[in-house]
Image: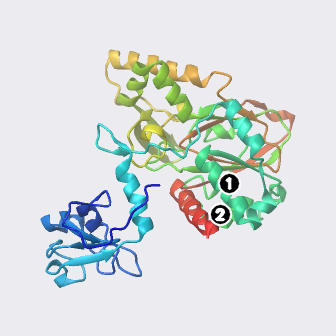
Amino acid sequence: MHRITPLRALGQTRRRVHGIPAGWLRDACQCPQCVHPSTRQKLISTGSLTAAAHAARVEGCKVEWGPGSVSHSAVAADLSKDRHSHEFDVRFLDKYKGVFASGERSSEGAQVKQNSPHKLWRASDFAAHRSKHSDIDYRQLVTSDTALLSLLQQLQSHGLAFVRNVPVTEADDPKQEPQLERIISRMGCVVRDSFYGRTWNVKSIQQAKNIAYTSLDLGLHMDLLYFDSPPGIQFLHSLKNSVTGGESIFLDSYKAAQMLKAESPHHFKTLTQLPVTFHYDNDGHLMKQHRYTITENDINSDAPDGMRVFYSPPFQGPLEHVRTDKDMAALVEAMRAFEDILRRPDMTFEIRMEAGMLVVFHNLRVLHGRKEFDAASGERHFKGAYIDYDVMKDRLSVLSRDLKR
């Protein structure tokens, strides 16, 4: 923490205030003239700042800018004429002084986070984590904010968490409200609807419209990459599972991508430069997106190096942006190198999802799949749902703050 030492007297005009650019602070002023008291939305725009905004005087945590520091305001016509001052909360200054004191600017100009909240893992790492932080009990989840916070923290750190003893009575009574609806509501989140429905059944059926609805081996993948904005969090609730086979598998794609970069940087680079096409063309729907398998320096990603991964072979379409023999050969070699890492036995966490278990995972980080099963040997019925990652992060931030009070 970069603690602020308040100045004791009005100082000279300066371009930095407590290590923070004066213009940045003017843009971030929290006073009622600059941020609406009830909506908490800005009343000035960054483009309204003038040269006068880039120098200020300081007294303690109070900052004063000269006349005309903004050219116009949404509510105060005279704001552009007078001196403007605001006494910042010392915690606000502490927080953002740290931003300016750390972090490296990427080649794209993004400030990449240096301390990622994600804990990258192999199978043994996650097994050790799960042993230390046991699965969350359903009754605790629905009654205890501490248990809910633990679930959200595990989703942020490892992208994967399990809940046990979830009721399964809905399996024999389709009219019952799905437990996933109740759990998601308890989390303070909203179900992400799609053409699959608010919740959806995962079981082997004839003439399936999705490979997940068969008994075939379902390799590691992410869901709905053919959407412009794929859902961030996925829930799978085991209602029945008496079949032979069908074990669930999970893998940290961030770890795999990090390993590829270290072991085969040229293959890693290829996957950041040649886009893959994902599509869904079935059952009256036609959706398509083009994505690089790996991206870096995304300022909105909390992963190391601002990483994101998009991998879903079952839902790939014809590669519309790979147009030369050279590029195709390079993509095949790079994808093979990546998949060689994915196939390493120590990378995949495997578990049999018995009835009453719920898995929650970060769909855009943790690859998931299922081994082939014998549909004639019993029943296998899971219920699924999605929420957006933003909603989960919102609940995590608010609950973390509230429980600290």
Numbered circle sitting on residue 18: none
- Residue with the most extreme front position: 8
Q: Position of residue 282 (x, y in %)?
A: 53, 42
Q: Residue at x 44, y 42 (%)?
A: 114
Q: Which mark is residue 187?
A: 2
User: What is the spatial separation of the Cα atoms under label 2 and label 1, in whole angstroms?
Assistant: 10 Å
User: Which picture quadrant has residue 391?
Assistant: bottom right
- Secondary structure beneath dot 2 equals loop
Residue at 72 percent across and 30 percent down: it is 371
Which residue is more in the foreground, 382 or 400?
400
Residue 118: image location, x then y, percent: 56, 43
Q: Residues within 10 Å of mark 1 (few under 14, many from 20)?
A: many
Q: How many marks?
A: 2
The color scheme shown is rainbow
User: Of 381 and 401, which appears nearest the observer?
Assistant: 401
Q: Looking at the image, can residue 314 be seen? A: no
* Relative image position of residue 26 (x, y in whole percent): 26, 68
Above or below: residue 63 compared with residue 5: below
Of residues 144 and 176, the one nearer the viewer is 144
Callout 2 touching callout 1 (CB < 8 Å): yes
- Position of the C terminus by quadrant: bottom right
Residue 171, placed above or below residue 13: above
Vertical placement of 353 versus 402: above or below?
Answer: above
Residue in the image at 23% along x and 62% along y: 23
Instruction: Tell me the amino acid under the disc marked 1.
Output: Leu
The mark that comes first in sequence, 2 or 1, is 1
Residue 127 coordinates in the image, percent (x, y): 73, 36
As drawn, is 34 to the left or to the right of 404?
A: left
**Residue 333 seen in render:** yes
- Secondary structure state at the residue bearing disc 1: helix
Question: On residue 151, which mark appears?
Answer: 1
